[in-house]
Image (spheres, helix red, strand yellow):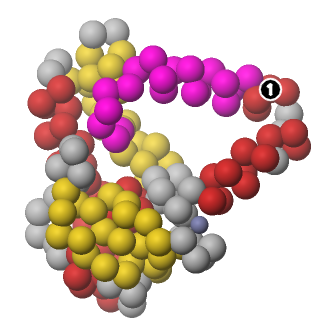
Amino acid sequence: MRGYNIDDYIGKRFNHLTLIKNLNKLDKHNSKLALFKCDCGNEKELVFTQVLSGEVTSCSCKKRGKNSNLTLTSVKNKKMEFYKNQTQKNNKTGYTGISYINGKYRVRIQINHNSKHIGYFNTLEDAIKARKDAEEKYFKPILEKYKAD
Ligand SMILES: [Zn+2]
């Protein structure tokens, strides 16, 4: 995503995570990494836009807590969860929000726990570009909001 600077968001809180440092480095998918401090005290390097969008809400301590409550969910929900996990496993492209389905690359973006469908693309390159454009479009208002706080 162009046109933003992680340094502007230091000290801002995103769910359970507070941005403490711009690492000025990229992960293997060219996504910008930043250092966050979780409510539990852990510090973790995370992809900035994933934290911003709500795809990542904690250092992963909260996720673990959620899974241990699985006994409370209905059998139907468990089945759905299982199906979802299987599908995600089979269609992994290694890129956030991009899955490979029936010969096409499906692009989605998660905004505050809602998954938005962006489209189907013939090549992974087009899908990556679409995902970056979507990040630009959907994350910008969120960035502006945090900046204004
Ligand atoms: Zn944590």
Q: Position of residue 119 (x, y in %)?
A: 28, 30
Looking at the rendered image, the quarter that the C terminus falls into is bottom left
Residue 27: in magenta span: no
Residue underneath mark 1: 76
Specify the quarter for ligand 1. bottom right
Looking at the rendered image, the quarter that the N terminus falls into is bottom left
Residue that appears at 32% across and 64% down: 48
Q: Position of residue 40 (x, y in %)?
A: 63, 73
Tell me where residue 84 sits by quadrant. Answer: top right
Tell me: 86 left or right of 148: right
Out of 145 and 95, give the one closest to the viewer. Answer: 95
Tell me: 92 left or right of 70: left
Disc 1 marks a residue whose amino acid type is: Lys
Residue 82: in magenta span: yes
Residue that appears at 12% across and 30% down: 125
Residue that appears at 15% across and 21% down: 123
Out of 69 and 21, give the one closest to the viewer. Answer: 21
Q: Main secondary structure of the magenta part?
A: helix
Indicate if the residue with disc 1 has its beta carbon within 8 Å of ligand 1.
no
Placement of 126 over or under 16, stated as above or below: above
What's drawn in magenta, residue-wise?
Answer: 79-98
